Structures are given as structure tokens and as C-alpha cells.
Amino acid sequence: MGKKKKDEETQPQKSAEKTKRKDVKERKDANKNTEFTCVKTTFNSLVENNFLNGGIQEIVLNINKFCFLSYQLLNYHFTRLIQEKKPLPEITQNLF
């Protein structure tokens, strides 16, 4: 048995025009004449001071925890709005 082809009516319609962000276009245009180099190294070889290394790693862990809790709070907020049948705010890059 082969796969059945879906009717054109059941397939979701793709939006005719993609949203284009002005800032992304400006960044890509600016980067056309820029040369980049990437050097792969470990964080420990870059920062040899153990005190500084430990401090930075602790800060990164705290920021990750903060981001996780922020996403969780936003999820609870949207769930509450849906349950109360209130309008949802526009979800953009600058939401929080």
C-alpha cells in the first residue's frame, strides 16, 4: 500500500509573503563586506583565573535559572488568560 496523497483543500495554505525585519536586513547588508574568523577553544583555557572562572559559571547558572522561571511564569500567565477567556497579548520578540 502506498501513501495517500492529500487533497489540496486539506493542506494548510502558506502565507504568500514572509515577514521581513528591517534590523536583520541591515545586519546582513553590513556583514556582506566583513570577514569573520572563528577559533574554537574551551572556557577554562580562556579564563585561567579560578576565582573569576567560578564566579562567571555561578552567574551563568543563576541567569539560566532566572530565564527558566521567567518562561514558566509567562506560561502560567498565558494559561490563566486562556482559562479566563481574556485576549492574549501580541507575542513578539520584546514580550519580556
Image (spheres, helix red, strand yellow):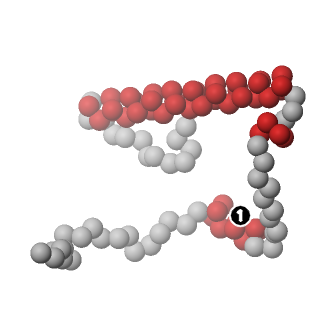
Query: What residue do we see at 40% from left, 33% from top?
Result: 75
Query: What residue do we see at 75% from left, 73% from top?
Result: 32
The image shows residue 32, relative to residue 53, as above or below, that is below
Residue 71 placement (x, y as % from top left) = 48, 33
Q: Is residue 37 visible?
A: yes
Secondary element under disc 1, as helix, strand or loop, is helix
Q: How many marks?
A: 1
**From the viewer's perspective, is 49 left or right of 15?**
right
- Identify the image quadrant of residue 20: bottom right
Of residues 43 and 56, the one nearer the viewer is 43
Of residues 37 and 63, the one nearer the viewer is 37
Residue 62 placement (x, y as % from top left) = 64, 25
Residue for badge 1? 27
- Identify the image quadrant of residue 6: bottom left
Of residues 28 and 43, the one nearer the viewer is 43
Three-letter code for the amino acid on which mark 1 is drawn? Arg
**From the viewer's perspective, is 4 left or right of 72?**
left
Answer few, some or many: residues within 10 Å of disc 1's Cα (few below 14, many 20 plus, some between 14 and 19): few
Of residues 35 and 96, the one nearer the viewer is 35
Residue 26 placement (x, y as % from top left) = 70, 66
Which residue appears farthest toward the right when viewing the image?
Answer: 49
- Where does the C terminus fall, quadrant-wise? top right
Query: What residue do we see at 77% from left, 24% from top?
Result: 55
Q: Is residue 7 visible?
A: no
**From the viewer's perspective, is 69 left or right of 11?**
right
Residue 95 placement (x, y as % from top left) = 52, 41
Query: What residue do we see at 80% from left, 29% from top?
Result: 53
The image shows residue 42, relative to residue 49, as above or below, that is below
- Identify the image quadrant of residue 28: bottom right
